[in-house]
Amino acid sequence: MSPTKTLGARALLALACLLNAAPAGAANNDPIVLVHGFLGFGPDTDPGNAFLYWGGYHDIAARMQLYKGPHAVYTAGVGAISSNWDRAAELYAQIKGGCVDYGAAHVARYGYPGQPRRPAGKCWAADPANNPHGYPLAFHPQWDAAHPLHLVGHSQGGTTIRALIQLLEHGSPDGDEGGGELYRGGKTGWVKSVVTISAPHNGTTLRDAVLDVMPNPRSPLRDILDQRLAHWEMAPDGAREFNRWALTSPSVYYFSLGTQATVAGAWCCNGSDRVIAPVQSSQFQYPREDMIPYFKLFAGELIVGSLAQPGMGSYTQSAPGRVRIDSSWFASDGVVNTVSMRAPAGHPVRDYDGRAVKGSWNYLGTYEGYDHFDILNWTNPGPSADAVYDRICDIIFGL
C-alpha cells in the first residue's frame, strides 16, 4: 500500500472510531480487542525483526481494521505466564484506563511470593488531556453496556477473556478487594461477543505428558508457582476447577474454533512426519509434516527422545479424582488438544449454523492442517489464516 493510501486508511479509521459508525451492511462497529496466549507478547514487546504475535511478519489487527471496515482493533499485552485472573485485571486496565489492581484479598490468598497488589508501571490513561505521567492511552475508556466491545483470544487469551467476563458481571467471590472497580461486578452487557481460537478450555495434556518425563522436584515454592500462575489452569485438572468459576454468561455471544495438526496413524501416505514416526498405529495421532518442528517432539504417540513416554497423541490417564483422559484427547494442534477447544466441559455448546445464540458456545468448526501458530500466520509451511479472521469479522460485526 502506498504512503498516501496508508494515511488515508488511517484517517478513515480514526473518523469511524470517533463517530462509532458501522460500515454499510454491518449491524455494529464495536471495537475488537485481541488477547494473546501463554508466553505471548503485545505489540510493544518486539522479540526482533518486527515480529508480531498476531500475524508474525504480517499484521492481523491491521487486516481486521480494514476488512469491510474501517474498524477499531486493538492488541493487548498481558502477563506472559500469569494466571487468568491477573491477566484479566491487566486487560481491564488497558481497555478502560487506570492502574492494574489484582485485588487485595486475591493477592493475599493466591498471589505468588512478594506479588504486589498494584504493580508499578502498569497504568493506562483514560483521558489524553489529563495524563501528567505520560501513560499509554486506554483502548476504550467509554467502555460500558452502551459502548460494548468484541474480545478475541488465542490459546490462554480465550480463558483470560472468560475470567474477565466473570469478574465484570459477578465481581470477586471474596467480595471487597480493596475498592478495585473491576471486582464490584454488575457490568453485564459490556462484552458483546467472545471468539476463542485454539483455547485450552478444558486444559491441555502437553503439560502432564511433558512433566512426566522431566525432573520434578517438589517444594512448597514449586507448588505455589505451579498452582498460582498459569500452569495449573492449563492442565485438565486445573481447567476443571477454573470452569466451575468462570461461567458462560447469558448476555454474551460466544464463538470458538479449533485447530488440528495431527493425523491418525497409517502405514504410509497420511501427511505425517515419517522421520519422527516411521512406524505408526491407527489408534494414535501423529504430527503433520508441516507442523512447527519443536512441537512435533510432543504431539505424537511418543515424546521424541524419551523412553517410551506417551506424547499427546497417545497420552491417557484415569486416576481417581482426576479428569479422565482418553482417546478423544489424542488429536491436537501440537500445543492444545483439539477436543478442549470446543467449549468448557459442562457449559452449553452447539455447532454454529449461521445463527448465533447468546449464552451458548457456537462452535465454528475444526480447522484441520493448522497448528497452534499457523492460525496466527506465523512463518511456517502451513496454511494461511487470513480467511479465518475475515470470517470472524463477518460474524461479529453482523451481530
Image (spheres, rainbow, N blue to C red):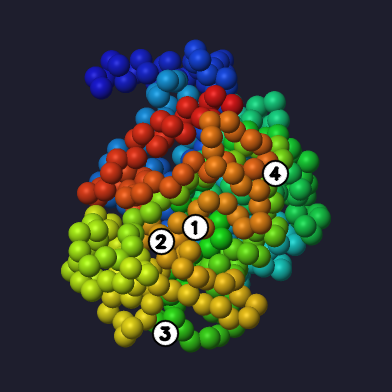
User: Are the residues tagged 4 and 3 within 8 Å (C-beta)?
Assistant: no
The image shows residue 310 at horizontal and vertical percentages of: 38, 77
For this rendering, which residue is in front, 185 or 307? 307
| Residue 281 falls left or right of residue 251 | left
Residue picked out by circle 1: 339
User: Given this view, does label 2 or label 4 mark the residue nearer the observer?
Assistant: 2
| N-term mark: 3 or 2 | 3
| N-term mark: 2 or 4 | 4
User: Gap between marks 3 and 2, in whole Å?
Assistant: 26 Å
| N-term mark: 3 or 1 | 3
Q: Quadrant of residue 266?
A: bottom left
| N-term mark: 4 or 3 | 3
Residue picked out by circle 4: 249
Kindly state the secondary structure of the residue where label 1 is placed.
helix
Q: Counting other residues with Cα less than 10 Å from the Cα at mark 2, is it few (<14), some (14-19), or many (20 or more)?
A: many
User: Gap between marks 4 and 3, in whole Å?
Assistant: 40 Å
Residue flagged by tag 2: what amino acid is it?
A: Ala
The image shows residue 196 at horizontal and vertical percentages of: 51, 46
Residue flagged by tag 4: what amino acid is it?
A: Ser
Q: Counting other residues with Cα less than 10 Å from the Cα at mark 1, is it few (<14), some (14-19), or many (20 or more)?
A: many
User: Given this view, does label 3 or label 1 mark the residue nearer the observer?
Assistant: 1
Residue flagged by tag 1: what amino acid is it?
A: Val
Q: Quadrant of residue 65?
A: top left
Relative height, residue 223 to residue 385 (above, below)? below
Kindly state the secondary structure of the residue where label 2 is placed.
loop
Residue picked out by circle 3: 215
| N-term mark: 1 or 4 | 4
User: Are the residues tagged 2 and 1 within 8 Å (C-beta)?
Assistant: yes
